[in-house]
Amino acid sequence: MTPDDPKPLQPGQILARGVARHLSALGFVCVEELVPTRGLRVDVMALGPKGDIWIVECKSSRADFMTDSKWQGYLEWADRFFWAVDADFDTDLLPEDSGLIIADGYGAEVLRMGGETRLAAARRKAITHKFATHAARRLHYLRDPHMTPHWD
């Protein structure tokens, strides 16, 4: 997607927008679709005012959740992990030890904080650098949509 050629948001992207708006109000900055390591792509990664790293996986339907076999690989890349779903989603499907956010395209609310597992210093430094690089590349691409993107 470029500023010259906008495409409609998918349901998960709409949830991600609401999540990012809410987390921004809490002092976090967010990027979407970040690749922490080969084979994984998180929906939302958030960097908190004290350096906390949160990952939020946005699920737009039961089928979307049931077919996600990679989410447990995200746990080692964040201090906290959350699911973001809309108000109609059957939250009984979601693991109780993870965080829960109810969202729509305009905002969100954290209903349950997941357990915290602090990242090791080296992992925190690596993922914070990846976060910053990803955010800078996204900004550059928005300013210069005709450049060739080099996503990690």
Image (tube, grey):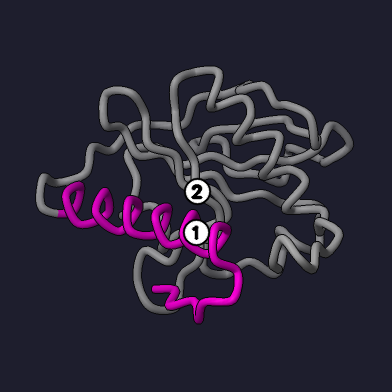
- x, y percent for residue 24: 53, 26
What residue is disc 1 on? 138
Dividing the picture into quadrants, the one containing residue 47 is top left
Residue stretch in magenta: 123-152
- x, y percent for residue 62: 81, 55
Dividing the picture into quadrants, the one containing residue 145 is bottom right
- x, y percent for residue 109: 67, 21
Q: Residue at (53%, 64%) from the top-left corner? A: 141
Q: Horizontal placement of 48 versus 127: left or right?
A: right
**Nearer to us in this view, 49 or 80:** 49
Q: CA distance from mark 1 to mark 2?
A: 9 Å
SS of the residue under disc 2: strand
Asked if the residues shown at circle 1 and circle 2 are in contact, with their CB atoms under 8 angstroms apart, the answer is yes
Report crowding for label 2: few under 14, some 14 to 19, many 20 or more residues within 10 A (C-alpha).
some
- x, y percent for residue 16: 67, 44
Q: Horizontal placement of 95 versus 76: left or right?
A: right
Q: Is residue 146 above or below residue 141?
A: below
What residue is disc 2 on? 31
Mark 1 or mark 2, earlier in chain: 2
Eye-nearest disc, 1 or 2: 1
- Magenta part mainly helix, strand or loop? helix
Q: Amino acid at mark 2?
A: Val
Q: Which mark is residue 106?
A: none
Q: Residue at (64%, 35%) from the top-left corner? A: 19
